[in-house]
Image: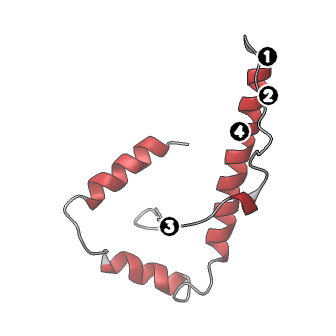
């Protein structure tokens, strides 16, 4: 819900760095069995996509009642199959 702030933080943390933070990826690899067990992150990704879909649907409904109405697209995003994961970043509290 705070995408701009998160992106700003990522940019500031990444500035001047060309390599990943070893402690971070070691903890991630340990927690996910070197990426073989991504179930908890898959659940979070599904929730994020559901939130996007809910927001998009609400925006379309709201626009129906605004001046000028709306034109609903024929090719709307319908579900997770309409997304492709190309990269991800995990943001966790230091003590989590």
Which residue, given by chain and number where applicable, does mark 3 sit on? 87
Kindly state the secondary structure of the residue where label 2 is placed. helix
Which residue is found at the position 65% from the left and 54% from the top?
A: 48
Of the image marks 4 and 1, the number of the one nearer the N terminus = 4
Q: Position of residue 33 (x, y in %)?
A: 55, 89
Q: Is residue 18 left or right of residue 8?
A: left
Q: CA distance from mark 1 to mark 3?
A: 37 Å
Image-quadrant location for residue 14: bottom left
Q: Position of residue 45 (x, y in %)?
A: 64, 62
Q: Are marks 3 and 2 in contact (CB under 8 Å)?
A: no
Of the image marks 1 and 3, the number of the one nearer the N terminus = 1
Q: Residues within 10 Å of mark 4 (few under 14, many from 20)?
A: some
Q: Position of residue 94 (x, y in %)?
A: 40, 66
Q: Position of residue 82 (x, y in %)?
A: 71, 58
- Kindly identify which numbered label has been placed on residue 65: 1
Q: Residues within 10 Å of mark 2 (few under 14, many from 20)?
A: some
Of the image marks 3 and 2, the number of the one nearer the N terminus = 2
**In front: 41, or 60?**
60
Of the image marks 2 and 4, the number of the one nearer the N terminus = 4
Q: Are marks 2 and 4 in contact (CB under 8 Å)?
A: no
Of the image marks 4 and 3, the number of the one nearer the N terminus = 4
Q: Is residue 48 above or below residue 81?
A: above
Which residue, given by chain and number where applicable, does mark 2 sit on? 61
Which residue is found at the position 80% from the left and 41% from the top?
A: 74
**In front: 43, or 65?**
65
Which residue is found at the position 50% from the left and 42% from the top?
A: 2
Q: Are marks 1 and 2 in contact (CB under 8 Å)?
A: yes
Which residue, given by chain and number where applicable, does mark 4 sit on? 56
Q: CA distance from mark 2 to mark 4?
A: 9 Å
Q: CA distance from mark 3 to mark 2?
A: 31 Å
């Amino acid at each position: 819900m705070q995408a701009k702030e998160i992106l700003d933080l990522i940019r500031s943390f990444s500035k001047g760095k060309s390599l990943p933070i070893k402690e971070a990826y070691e903890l991630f690899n340990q927690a996910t069995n070197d990426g073989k067990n991504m179930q908890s992150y898959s659940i979070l990704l599904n929730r994020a996509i559901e939130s996007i879909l809910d927001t998009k649907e609400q925006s379309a409904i709201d626009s129906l009642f605004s001046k000028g109405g709306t034109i609903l697209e024929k090719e709307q995003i319908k579900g997770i199959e309409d997304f492709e994961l190309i990269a991800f970043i995990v943001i966790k509290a230091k003590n989590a």
